[in-house]
Amino acid sequence: MLIFSFSNEREVEKVMRDIGVDPYGIKIMLPKTTTFLIRLSSISNIAANILKQEMLSLGGDAAVSRGALTGKTKKTGCLIIAQSSQLYSLVNKLKLQPFGLQKLADELDKNIKKYTRGGFILPLRKGVLNFGAKTYIMGAMNLTPDSFSGDGLYSIKSSDYPALALEKAEKMLKNGADIIDLGGESSRPGARSISVKEELRRVLPVLRKLAKNIAAPISIDTTKAEVAKAALESGAQIVNDIAGLRDKRMARVAAKYKAAVVIMHMPGRPSNMQKMTAYKSLIDDIIVWLNNAVESAERAGIQSDKIIIDPGIGFGKTPGQNLEIIKRLADFKILGKPMLIGPCRKSFIGKVLKAVPQERCIGTVAACLMAAERGANIVRVHDVKEVSQALKMSAAIRNNANA
């Protein structure tokens, strides 16, 4: 006898095929092997009790407060416990019910489809990113004199630092990077903004050099619409905006140039973000914020399939909150977008390991592996070779045909 713990449906399907289950039987039974826990923050007691009865009739359940059962309260939270096959049956049943359950059915249907969506294909002006194939690595290249990680190329006293940047980019690509991310302004906690002119002076020479010499897509890490516009005209294909397109001009620029965008969550600005770490409910608050930002981006004309989300590790979060985000990263699947996460060498790793930035490589690798297992499609790192090797090993174990 063996008791199994599966990480995905493909593993279950393989066991069924090994047993010799009929293909039609596999199709019927596979949806029964995945259980979802769906939390509703507040619904009326009447709706909750109908929902519970419907779930029980389908073989699932719904946990509600004691007050909802005794009638002592008017509203209750609710935890739906269901297999995927039961959820779709539940949606159809709720569409026939009053008390706001028809609206709940529509929301369930929409969110289940977004949560279970996979195999994202993100089109670029040149080529595509196929997130169903692997976890992509974004190589971070800081063109600043004050990078917290100590690798700011702009601090190097060289008349031809673009050539040094090209050399570094080529090494990153050789070591496993899929995207090169250029940033000309520090976003470390407490950092002050620089002028558009200075940021362009740091970024454009390198960007133009790279665009002529490498085939990999280039991302521009900026919060300024003017910098994004110049970068897109010079060969960048992705705008990585830590301000989450807060500047409406940024969204218009991205839409005009048909660029892919990374929308990141950050309260305030780098200069004051670490004073804004109070959340009513950390994950819920970030999801709502990102959802609003995504909807705003789409209204501005950015194509839905060109949007990537980033919960903003290290930006307006305490060390404990950063750990919680990685632990619960799968919760962000409800937004139905590819996910990027950037834990590399950040202070929460230093706090756990009691290590300075240059000694946080192993911690970075661990964070990236945990994030990838929970659904991260892109990891943004400085330690490209180490993270690439770890991800390849993890994928080999996960996809081993003999397992």
Image (cartoon, helix red, strand yellow):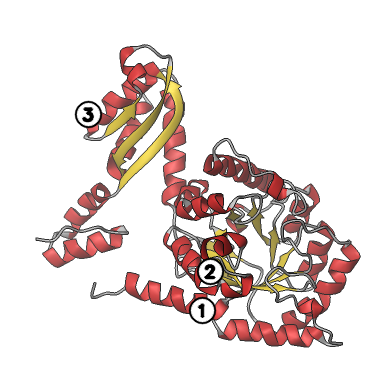
Instruction: Tell me what residue is drawn at x 58 percent, y 44 percent.
Output: 286
Instruction: Classify residue 35 as left or right of residue 290.
Output: left
- Say whether disc 1 or disc 3 marks the residue closer to the N-terminus: 3
Tell me: residue 244, above or below residue 354. above
Tell me: residue 383, above or below residue 101. below
Q: Which residue is mark 2?
A: 364
Say which mark, if any, is on residue 209: none
Say which mark, if any, is on residue 57: 3
- Say whether disc 2 or disc 3 marks the residue closer to the N-terminus: 3
Direction top: furthest residue: 72
Mark 2 and mark 3 in contact? Answer it, CB < 8 Å: no
Instruction: Tell me what residue is drawn at x 54 percent, y 38 percent.
Output: 281
Q: Specify the quadrant of the image occupied by residue 158.
A: bottom right
Q: Percent x, y for residue 376?
A: 50, 60
Q: Can I make out residue 214 in this image?
A: no
Q: Percent x, y for residue 44?
A: 43, 19
Say which mark, if any, is on residue 386: 1
Question: How far is mark 1 from mark 2, CA to CA?
Answer: 9 Å
Question: How far is mark 2 from mark 3, CA to CA?
Answer: 47 Å
Mark 1 and mark 2 in contact? Answer it, CB < 8 Å: yes
Amino acid type at mark 1: Glu
